[in-house]
Image (spheres, coloured by chain):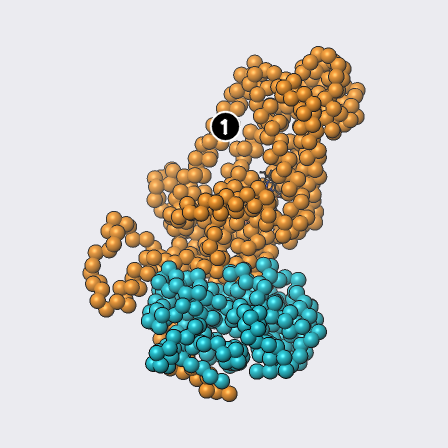
Amino acid sequence: MRVPTMAEKMANGESPDILFWVGCAGSFDDRAKKITKAIVKILNKCQVDFAVLGTEESCSGDPAKRAGNEFTFQMQAMMNIEVMNAYEVKKIVTACPHCFNTLKNEYPELGGNYEVIHHTQLIQDLINTGKLILEGGETFKGKKITFHDPCYLGRANDVYEAPRSLIEKLDAELVEMKRCKTKGLCCGAGGAQMFKEAEKGNKEINVERTEDALETQAEIIATGCPFCNTMMTDGVKNFEKEGDVKVMDVAELIAHAADL
Amino acid sequence: MEIILFAILLSAGAGFFAYNAWKVRYNILLGQDIDRSDKKGERIKTMVLVAFGQKKMFSRPIPALLHLALYVAFVITQIELIEIAIDGLSGHHRFFYFKLGGFYSFMISFIEILSVLAFVATLAFLIRRNLLKLPRFTMKELIGWPTKDANIILIAEVVLICCIFSMNGADEVLYSRGGSHVEFAKGHYDFAISSWMGPLLFQNFSIDALHVIERIGWWGHILMVFAFLNYLPYSKHFHILLAFPNTFYSNLEQKGKFTNMESVTNEVKLMLDPNADPYAAPANPDEAPKRFGAKDVTDLTWKNLLDAYTCTECGRCSSSCPANVTGKLLSPRKIMMDTRDRLVEVGENYRKHGKGYDDGKSLIGDYITEEELWACTSCNACVQECPVNIDPLSIIVDLRRYLVMEESKIPSELTGMLTNIENNGAPWQFAQSERLNWANED
Ligand code: HEM
Ligand code: SF4
Ligand code: SF4
């Protein structure tokens, strides 16, 4: 696995085509780190000229902004923008829909103008241009896979097709939940909920959502967000189904299929 | 005599409505400024699709079709209303009948058929509210006045349609007997419904009685319309007018984009820039310092307030809200209803006691609780679902901003999360220097 940093590239007088924004979950959460690595393997395999910020990366500020603390958000945003502008970053791929949304929509007004894409969009492009070929690895042929739309990818930014097209490329059977795409139900993590207990109610949101997923009889619940991944994994555990149903990021499915 | 009475009623109805409309406008303009004057073309397109075209209604086809019947009937019936106004002021009877000839019968027939559809739809709406008790119409924020409001409208609609048919039906019979005011010869209008329903209902009545029935229908219709018009500003039924401007002024940005707070940007720039002069005069010295976020309705934008008046209380937002469906207190519909109720209260206060009057109450606390606000996942389902492009989320966010930045009222776990971000650049306690460790682990 090769993970060049922006600083190294700069020292060699190079400027990579794309910055891979890993995000806090992707950097520190044990489950999400696996997704990060799957993405890096895909980038390596396709010889994408990328780099990460590494220790120069800092939280995008999304949870602070959703929690209502605009100060902390803007401090984070401006520091990140300063770093990225110094490296003359033009294009960014993120592994997290929250970073994706914030960098794409909320950084421009603070002076950060970049082309930002989600990793499923990048992978879709790599497959469509023939750079990535799905063979030699685990086969998903005929397996039932359902996709849980992350709110900040779907409704927030209207990206519904990229992750689905990848599942179809696996030759798998994509089964939709009763609430999907624009009507997809939140996993319960957004808006800084990930970092606190839920308010009093009669059910946890991730349990409600996992019911939707289990109803489809899918063997795999695919997601495109590290937080959704956590919530759905906990939901599956709640029904003691972790033996039958796996929760995986679309990037991991692709990496497995391409034997990476 | 009738003409004078009609003229008085018309001016009273219109005048009172104008007064109420002015009050609503006054209230809405109490909101903060926000620029929605750009992208006219896209705005018109949105209004045509979402309001005229009812586009978002159709994500739930059955209520959408029922509503479509009501909506189209209402719009087309305006033609008949114009005739009623002309007749009322000029003393004519069915002014357009001789002007339009065969087309008149076609037009009124069209209105009649739509009215029958609207009648069926209205009954269906009454049934789903009062007999089927759909969950989205029985949530607790609807108990009391809101439910009554909904039923008043629907019953008024039924009465209105009955008036149309007693007017047309009686007139058909009169015409066939040579007693119609339209022409004292015998004839037929050939209206699609009342040409057979009229005789069926009114065959045995005398000409005098028929004249009375026809007049009751005519006056009933127009009186109902005046009453309706003036009821609108107090009701969720206001949407029949406000749906159009409200969709025109929609937020056209990506739903995930929260507004940037410029007041904060300036302060953050000062903090980050070592050369900045902290004692420099503010850029806009005339501007009164605004509070961060929203405590009360006057801190919200005028679009938030227009949203509140436009809300149909349909509950599509709440029935798709993850917090609401799992039993939390939060209901985005209630956020909109509270905002409207509070705005009406503030507006009354300002007009009575002077602008800026403080009654010691606020939207946060007296109407919306912190528990509701913290249950939101910012998932945008409510925004997506709203058929009239209302944005409850932006109100929720502005109220949270006030709680956090002005009052430091925030769930303690979130305080920890924020401290971590400020100290080590991640919501958890991991050092920034360890951010790339994953690359070397296996
Ligand atoms: C201009 C003529 C219109 C009329 C006469 C009309 C009439 C009505 C009536 C009577 C209801 C009440 C249904 C109930 O309470 O059960 C209703 C609800 C509603 N109307 Fe309208 N409306 C009009 C225009 C519009 C427009 C332009 C929109 C925009 C899309 C709209 C959106 C709605 C919505 C969302 C509801 C709640 C429906 C639901 O329960 O799903 N209306 N309307
Ligand atoms: S954005 Fe908040 S209020 Fe709206 S549906 Fe989602 S959780 Fe509910
Ligand atoms: S905000 Fe929109 S979806 Fe919610 S009740 Fe009002 S009109 Fe219906």
**As rendered, which of B362 and A132 lies closer to the eye?**
A132
Q: Amino acid at mark 1?
A: Ala
**Residue B129 in view here:** no
Q: Chain of mark 1?
A: B
Q: Split into 4 quadrants, where in the image is the N terminus of chain B?
A: top right
Which chain is displayed in orange in the rendered image?
Answer: B
Q: Residue B262, position in %: x, y?
A: 34, 57
Give the residue at the far top of this rendering.
Answer: B184
For the colour cyan, the matching chain is: A
Q: Is residue A91 above or below residue B283?
A: below
Location of residue B306 with respect to B74 vertically, above or below: below
Residue at the disc numbered 1 = B14
Secondary-structure class at tag 1: helix
Please report the residue visible at 50 percent of the width from the left and 68 percent of the height from the top: A118
Tell me the residue at 39%/44% (across/down): B30
* Mark 1 surroundings: few (<14), some (14-19) or many (≥20) residues within 10 A: some
User: Which of A207/B368 is in front?
Assistant: A207
Whole-percent x, y for residue A22 in the image: 46, 75
